[in-house]
Image (spheres, helix red, strand yellow):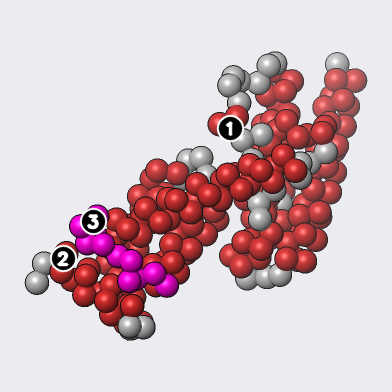
Amino acid sequence: MTEESDDEELATRMLCGDEEALREVLRVHLGPVRDVMNGTYGKTVHQILIDEAVSFAVAKMWRTAGSYDKARGTLGAWLFIMAQSRLRDILRREKRDRIRFPLMDPEYDRAVECPSDRSDEPEDKEEAQELQELRYVVENKLKGHQKAIILADLAAGGTANAGSLAEILGTSKDVIYVSRNKAHENIRKEMQLREQRRNSLKGKK
């Protein structure tokens, strides 16, 4: 039996509600699909959003197995196309949310613009240092949900969807909102402390 006919049989079994068929598909195709998604988008999109897109594609494949067409490729190719399409939808959604709901106060908002939206490097050394410090604070001073949420926000170029984050992190939307607010406050405090230290060092010169 060829791989193509195997995929067709597995799709038929999934259509009939056979969960073992779904597990077989995931055993064969999920790893490669994740590898391609990470290789394609891993440097520009946060892992949380890639995982969300892949999870969505798996659920959609299970729900719509009857629409699988072997002439268009393997189940793995179909799964990848759905994951890629979902990720693009997520990024478009988050870009709209960024416009509606700025991630941070205007003082720091320039530091969280989506990289693809920037046509050049920071204008001066001071801005470059500020950007570097913000990234350092997020990576090294935030923990747990706070860090995961802000990294997702940064990857989205705005405010990541609270419902999606709640599902991924195994918590509620309320916890996402509270954690995000606490993270913003911690970032502000840390940035202020770092600015005070710089000013203090300047004063000693």
State the residue at coordinates (76%, 35%): 109
Image spot of residue 52 (x, y percent)? 52, 59
Q: Secondary structure at mark 3?
A: loop
Image check: 196 left or right of 180? right
In which quadrant is the N terminus drawn? Answer: bottom left
Q: CA distance from mark 1 to mark 2?
A: 40 Å
The boundaries of the magenta stretch are 63-74
Classify mark 3: residues with Cα within 10 Å, few (<14), some (14-19) or many (20+): few
Asked whether the beta carbons under mark 2 and mark 3 sit within 8 Å of each other, the answer is: no
Q: Nearer the viewer, mark 2 or mark 3?
A: 3
Residue placed most toward the observer, 92 or 188: 92
Residue placed most toward the observer, 192 or 123: 123
In which quadrant is the C terminus drawn? Answer: top right
Disc on the earlier residue, 3 or 1:
3
Residue bearing mark 2: 3
Classify mark 2: residues with Cα within 10 Å, few (<14), some (14-19) or many (20+): few
State the residue at coordinates (27%, 76%): 12
Q: Secondary structure at mark 1?
A: helix
Q: Is residue 121 magenta?
A: no
State the residue at coordinates (60%, 29%): 117
Q: Secondary structure at mark 2?
A: helix
Res 133 seen here: no
Q: Which mark is residue 73?
A: 3
